[in-house]
């Protein structure tokens, strides 16, 4: 979808549809007041009849309103005036785009950014509208044969602003993030028989071909074996799909030390010998959402041409039961030289991540952030609202917390105390790959921390935020907004 910015009054804006906000108790937004005055108090009549209450997300499409240039006016509820929350605003924009896309309008202009949302700038509201709109319109179709297209979809969405430059930048940033999220959704939603490690590698090569600023490197199993990645390769032994180590190097800032993003790329996780229950196992195609978010983030920053260096590292494999698969009690040797006792083959994500983290040392990183659907325990702790965050550096943790709040793709920090490390003690190896029932998300991060002693590092457990289950089953595209915002803040703090 294309986007534009205008400073014209809603009563005279040349557009197929004008979108204005109505608050609860019949209060009008500034643009709604202009429309109301130009139409001889038509909106007041509608509200007094009870046709519009102003509840967040409520909509009413009006045709041929007297005194208005646009043939359509869409009223959108925004909740209580001056108390509109971020969730209220997202509900309003999502409802708006659904109605507009089915309305027959080719283009529309939104005046919703004038709504006061708690401590949020106009730029944030415009960017969030673009992101929310893309999420609402996203439909997975790649493996479906009977897809009904919208007869006349919305193709252009405009934003009212008196600060044209800031609004244009917000729109561009939102569009890049939305495109990155769509890429992450699409990769994540593909079935495991399509989205294999080799497929992910091919997509990384395609991404590199799309942007001159991105260079892609793929390591095969023989090359990983030469590097001593015994932990990663132990996971792929049970699969007929060969593992890949994917590196996407975005160069936007000369010789600056890069931010390294390590994304878990388990394209399907059956649990290995420690087989998962059959119910819900289909959702284990989403065990590569961490890698998908790295793809989406690299795409977004390359589109924005950000002045920063970022390396995306994706260890990719399947975790399947097989005669050659890992067995509980097996001991493998990681690239770092540490031996690992595998007590549960379903705790495989940390086995591929630890070698990828060691591999990241060669980039002399400024910081390293890994992103992984790592533990079911994080869903118990935080639900689907917040991503779990653990770090070996509080400044980095604070920066990610801030980026989460800025982007409304929020994180919550959990402890990474030495007290938990003893749960990973093994009688037979340097470290066990699980730490028992207690604090499962924390001990998983503690495992990874053993391989991050040479750099500043944070871990994002996205098992609760990367996809939705049930009727709305599908990938969310998170945490692409968080990661892009972190990089934007990182650039701003260094300038």
Image (cartoon, rainbow, N blue to C red):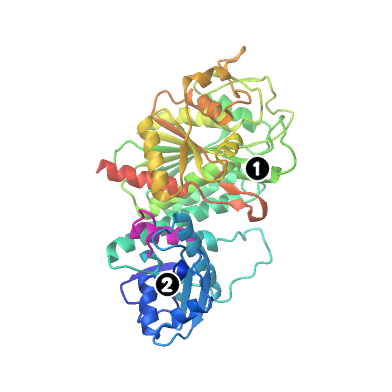
- Magenta residues span 115-132
Q: Is residue 173 above or below residue 5?
A: above
Whether residue 353 can be seen here = yes
Per the image, is 121 magenta? yes
Which one is in front, 66 or 144?
Answer: 66
The residue beneath circle 2 is: 20
66 with respect to 428 (left or right): left
Crowd tier of the residue under label 2, counting other residues whose Cα lies within 10 Å: few below 14, some 14–19, many 20 or above: many
Q: From the viewer's perspective, is 358 left or right of 434? A: left
Contact between labelled residues 2 and 1, with CB atoms less than 8 Å apart: no
Q: Position of residue 51 (x, y in %)?
A: 54, 76
Q: Position of residue 465 (x, y in %)?
A: 54, 45
Labelled disc at residue 284: 1
* Position of residue 333 measured from the top left corner of the image (x, y, whole percent): 57, 20
Q: Residue at x 27, y 65 (%)?
A: 163
Does 333 appear in magenta? no
Number of dots carrying numbers: 2
Q: Residues within 10 Å of mark 1 (few under 14, many from 20)?
A: many
In the image, is residue 439 above or below residue 388?
Answer: above
Q: Which mark is residue 36?
A: none
Using residue 139 as the reference point, say whether residue 388 is left or right of it: left
Give the vertical position of 261 relative to 39 (above or below): above
User: Which is nearer the eye, 374 or 235?
Assistant: 374
| Residue found at the very far bottom of the displayed protein | 66
Quadrant housing residue 232: top right
323 with respect to 172 (left or right):
right
Is residue 214 shown to the viewer in this render? no
The residue at the point 44 percent across, 70 percent down is: 22
């Amino acid at each position: 979808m294309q986007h534009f910015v205008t400073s014209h009054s809603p009563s005279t804006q040349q557009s197929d549809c004008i979108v204005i906000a109505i608050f609860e108790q019949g209060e009008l937004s500034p643009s709604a007041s202009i429309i109301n005055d130009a139409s001889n108090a038509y909106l007041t009549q509608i509200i007094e009849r009870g046709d519009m209450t102003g509840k967040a997300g409520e909509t009413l499409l009006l045709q041929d309103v007297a005194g208005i240039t646009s043939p359509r006016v869409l009223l959108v509820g925004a909740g209580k005036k001056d108390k509109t929350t971020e969730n209220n605003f997202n509900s309003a924009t999502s409802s708006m785009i659904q109605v507009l896309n089915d309305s027959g309008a080719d283009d529309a202009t939104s005046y919703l950014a004038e709504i006061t949302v708690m401590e949020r700038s106009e730029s944030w509201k415009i960017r969030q509208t673009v992101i929310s709109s893309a999420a609402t319109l996203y439909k997975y179709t790649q493996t479906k044969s009977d897809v009904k297209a919208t007869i006349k979809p919305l193709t252009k969405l405009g934003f009212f602003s008196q600060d044209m430059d800031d609004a244009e930048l917000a729109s561009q940033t939102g569009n890049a993030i939305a495109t990155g999220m769509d890429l992450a959704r699409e990769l994540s939603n593909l079935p495991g028989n399509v989205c294999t490690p080799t497929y992910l590698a091919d997509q990384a090569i395609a991404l590199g071909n799309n942007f001159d600023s991105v260079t892609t490197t793929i390591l095969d199993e023989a090359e990983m074996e030469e590097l001593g990645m015994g932990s990663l390769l132990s996971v792929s032994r049970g699969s007929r799909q060969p593992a890949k180590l994917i590196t996407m190097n975005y160069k936007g800032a000369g010789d600056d030390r890069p931010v390294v993003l390590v994304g878990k790329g388990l394209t399907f996780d059956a649990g290995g010998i420690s087989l998962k229950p059959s119910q819900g196992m289909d959702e284990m195609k989403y065990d590569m959402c961490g890698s998908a978010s790295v793809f989406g983030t690299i795409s977004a920053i390359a589109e924005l041409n950000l002045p920063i260096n970022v390396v995306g590292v994706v260890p990719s494999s399947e975790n399947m039961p097989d005669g050659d698969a890992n067995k509980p009690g097996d001991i493998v040797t990681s690239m770092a030289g540490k031996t690992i006792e595998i007590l549960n083959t379903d705790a495989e994500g940390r086995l591929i991540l630890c070698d990828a983290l060691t591999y990241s040392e060669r980039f002399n990183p400024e910081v390293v952030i890994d992103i992984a659907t790592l533990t079911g325990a994080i869903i118990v702790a935080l639900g689907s609202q917040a991503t779990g965050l653990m770090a070996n550096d509080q400044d980095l943790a604070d920066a990610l917390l801030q980026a989460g709040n800025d982007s409304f793709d929020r994180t919550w920090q959990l402890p990474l105390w030495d007290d938990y490390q003893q749960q990973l003690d093994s009688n037979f190896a340097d470290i066990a790959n699980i730490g028992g029932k207690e604090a499962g998300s924390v001990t998983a991060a503690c495992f990874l921390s053993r391989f991050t002693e040479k750099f500043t590092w944070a871990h994002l457990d996205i098992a609760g935020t990367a996809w939705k289950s049930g009727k709305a089953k599908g990938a969310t595209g998170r945490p692409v907004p968080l990661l892009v915002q972190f990089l934007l803040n990182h650039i701003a703090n260094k300038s």
